[in-house]
Image (cartoon, rainbow, N blue to C red):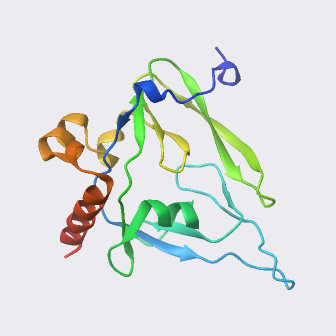
């Protein structure tokens, strides 16, 4: 089946479980986009390390790697809703998305907020069986390759061992902030 013919993911809430992000500090800097002489925000594009192109129609955060290069970007409002600043350069994700393992090949369409507030389909990625389909708290759909999932999220067994499933949102956020601060020290 050709990539374009794959079914598009429609998130299945019935299959989803709560996912717990690892409290790894992330280095991120706010990037102010340029403005025209009249004060209009000008779209800004970056090329993430994973490839493709990200276009921003407002200020955004650049996630910085160990050598100071921007790996990828995240819209300002979305970033600030999902993360807490733990020191002048580091943030930690404190919200818990929902997700499940893909059972068949499918595609996820990345949509961005356009300059006029309209939603624009930007591109799509192929999701393979075993990859995770994830819905972030703001509704954004994304995928995480099966091999990379344990780098970003606790497995269900690890979450259970740590008692994370019994934590409410505020309790998990406080726990994640404390863990990230310990890692920075």
- Residue 154 lies in quadrant: top left
Residue at 76% x, 57% y is 117
Q: Nearer the viewer, residue 120 or 125?
A: 120
User: On the rendered image, what quadrant is the N terminus found in?
Assistant: top right
Count of numbered labels shown in the rendering: 0
Q: Position of residue 162 (x, y in %)?
A: 14, 46
Q: Position of residue 168 (x, y in %)?
A: 28, 51
Residue 9 horizontal side relative to residue 56, left or right: left
Using the image, determine if residue 162 lies above or below residue 99.
below
- Residue 41 lies in quadrant: bottom right
Q: Position of residue 38 (x, y in %)?
A: 87, 83
Using the image, determine if residue 54 lies above or below residue 88.
above
Q: Nearer the viewer, residue 3 or 95?
A: 95
Residue at 77% x, 79% y is 35
Q: Nearer the viewer, residue 50 or 165?
A: 165
Q: Position of residue 70 (x, y in %)?
A: 51, 66
Residue 182 in sight: yes
Residue 71 in sight: no
């Amino acid at each position: 089946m050709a990539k374009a013919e794959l079914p598009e993911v429609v998130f299945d809430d019935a299959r989803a479980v709560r996912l717990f992000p690892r409290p790894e500090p992330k280095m991120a800097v706010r990037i102010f986009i340029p403005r025209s002489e009249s004060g209009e925000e000008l779209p800004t594009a970056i090329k993430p390390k994973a490839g493709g192109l990200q276009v921003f129609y407002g200020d955004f955060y650049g996630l910085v790697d160990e050598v100071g290069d921007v790996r990828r970007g995240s819209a300002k409002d979305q970033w600030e809703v999902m993360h807490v600043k733990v020191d002048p350069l580091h943030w930690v994700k404190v919200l818990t998305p929902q997700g499940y393992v893909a059972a068949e090949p499918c595609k996820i369409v990345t949509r961005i907020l356009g300059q006029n507030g309209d939603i624009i389909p930007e591109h799509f990625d192929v999701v393979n069986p075993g990859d995770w389909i994830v819905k972030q708290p703001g509704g954004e759909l994304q995928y995480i390759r099966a091999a990379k999932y344990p780098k970003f999220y606790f497995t269900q067994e690890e979450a259970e061992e740590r008692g994370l499933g019994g934590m409410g949102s505020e309790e998990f956020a406080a726990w994640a902030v404390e863990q990230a601060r310990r890692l920075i020290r």
